Amino acid sequence: MPFPDGFLWAAAAAAYQIEGAAFDGGRGRSVWDDFCDIEGAVRNGHTGEVACDHYNRYLEDVACMADLGLHAYRLSISWPRILPAGIGEPNEEGLRFYDRLIDALLEAGIQPWVTLFHWDFPSDLQARGGWLQRDSAEWFGEFAGLVAARLGDRVTHWITLNEPQVYIDLGHKIGTHAPGLKLSLHDQLLAGHNTLRAHGLAVQAIRSGSPNECRIGFTGVGRACCPVDQLDETIEAARRKTNGVERDHHFSNAWWFDPVCLGEYPSHGIEVFGSDMPSIPDGDMQQINQPIDFLGLNIYQGSYVELDEDGAARDVPLDVGHPITAFDWPVVPEALHWGPRFVHERYDLPIYITENGLASMDWVARDGRVHDINRIDYTGRYLEQLRQAIEAGTDVRGYFHWSILDNFEWAEGYTKRFGLIHVDYPTGRRTPKESSQWYSGVIASNGASL
């Protein structure tokens, strides 16, 4: 059974993870360049200095995308490649790179979806306080307006921020991601509040700066608590847990999506954080709550829940030997059913799965091919659940596989392979995996081949 007519089949990547050329073409430093310089911060001392060399090999990569039959490609813009100091005079050479990339995608019949922030915060602005500095929202708004004015004649789909849950939790709480901070809970929440303000100012800047009509969204991690049965009370308990806020982590849907879509923080979250909540100046929530056109969800895993004796959701321990990925993430295909479903119910906005994929142990076999059968099985299981969500009434309009290429996986360096296309990092050689051929068939059949 096919997916709905017009369903968008796509793939994604991010600037720091694939571009390389970290110190070429006038690009400034980012917090990830700085983090990679810290001994022991990134596995094996890996850096994004060369990555997949996409900066120089983008035409080859676009040709691979075209061979796959992608409808769209989600890329991110390197903030310090456009504004080396984060603000001030733009770097024309950096802008020209994205001009060329966008033009190549369009010539290949691939729609560019542009994410403005995928974690590469400019080093100079980090030195001025980063997301803790209230001016950070204005800095990002200026960057967004500049990019929209330059690329908006060709780019019609924009995403402001990618996964604030991750760069606030891992980057500002635990310190295992850039910028490597371990802030107080109050300051973590303040950094998160400023990043949401940055989203709102970016939406305003894109709409005013783009020469054409455009569609704008916001992407977060999609938490998915999956009911173990179809009883109404179990589903409701899973819904409440999915939308819950917990004090010990930032991986909440409602805490990030409610301000963007509803103009307020969830009251239960304010109670949870208590005296650690930062003060919210008048007008901030209106600034955050700008009209958007869709929500993006990045969903790789989930949990199973059952009813406890009080009627609340209780996590169900996974069986011994439950499937896990090379990242040790549990394989929970139902996450792509219940995650989008609960988010759509709460906000009534179109949903795009902006990331989903598998970290696996891939290598080029003796026959010259990459036999990643587990990626095919994983993706097929998840897509079957996504189709069920659509059949149940969830307005899901597209799926972006993560990732088009093997790439720099942040603190894990090059030890985790997510790509549909294998990259031999010493040589840069690209080898399409069996999953890329399979995914091409899924696209050509609009999902019927599942």
Image (tube, helix red, strand yellow):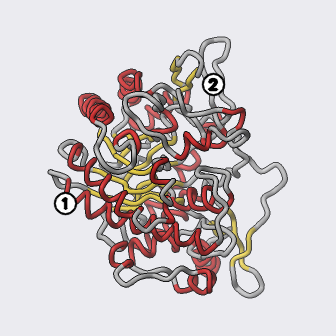
Compared with 238, 440 (above or below) is above
For marks 2 and 1, the one nearer the N-term is 1
Quadrant in the rendering for residue 448: top left
Quadrant in the rendering for residue 145: bottom left
The residue depicted at 53 percent of the width and 30 percent of the height is 49
Q: Nearer the viewer, mark 2 or mark 1?
A: 1
Residue 203: image x %, image y %? 30, 62
Q: Is residue 413 left or right of residue 383?
A: right
Badge 1 local density, few (<14 within 10 Å), some, or many (20+)?
A: some
Viewer-proximal residue among 20 and 234: 20
Badge 2 local density, few (<14 within 10 Å), some, or many (20+)?
A: some
The residue depicted at 64 percent of the width and 39 percent of the height is 359
**Helix or strand or loop: what does disc 1 sit on?**
helix
Q: What residue did someone put label 1 on?
A: 208
The residue depicted at 46 percent of the width and 41 percent of the height is 14
Residue 4: image x %, image y %? 35, 52
Q: Is residue 74 visible?
A: no
Q: Amino acid at mark 1?
A: Ser
- Residue at the limit of the structure toward the left, as seen here: 211
**Helix or strand or loop: what does disc 2 sit on?**
loop
Compared with 165, 365 (above or below) is above
Q: Which mark is residue 371?
A: 2
